[in-house]
Amino acid sequence: MKLAVITDSSAFLQAEALRKEDLFVLDIPVNIDGQEYV
């Protein structure tokens, strides 16, 4: 069985964690008053 971890780009992860091959970071835009932030 394979396992992967998916998180969004607002998670404050250390560089070591970001290098893991089974970790995927998604850019999830946030829209506030019509202004989009990624």
Image (tube, rainbow, N blue to C red):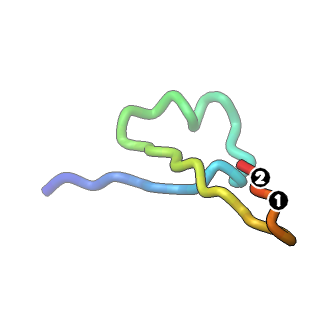
Image spot of residue 19 (x, y percent): 51, 28
* SS class, disc 1: strand
Of all residues, the one furthest to the right in this rendering is 33
Q: Quadrant of residue 1?
A: bottom left
Image quadrant of residue 16? Answer: top right
Looking at the image, residue 16 sits to the left or right of residue 23; the answer is right
Which residue is drawn at the image coordinates 82% and 59% (left, top)? 35
Residue 34, placed above or below residue 14: below
Give the image location of residue 18, x and y in percent: 56, 34
> Can you tell which quarter of the image residue 21 is in?
top left
Q: Which residue is mark 1?
A: 35
On screen, residue 9 versus residue 21, left or right, reads right
Q: Residue at x 54, y 56 (%)?
A: 7
Q: Which mark is residue 8?
A: none
Which residue sits at x=52%, y=49%?
26
- Mark 2 and 1 residues: CB-CB less than 8 Å, in contact? yes
Count all numbered tags in the image, as a single digit: 2
The label shown at residue 37 is 2
Rounded to the nearest angstrom, the CA distance separating label 2 from label 1 is 7 Å
- Residue neighbourhood size for the residue with mark 1, other residues' Cα within 10 Å, grouped as few (<14), some (14–19), many (≥20): few
Residue type highlighted by circle 2: Tyr
In the rendered structure, the answer to whether residue 15 lies left or right of residue 37 reads left
Residue type pointed to by label 1: Gln
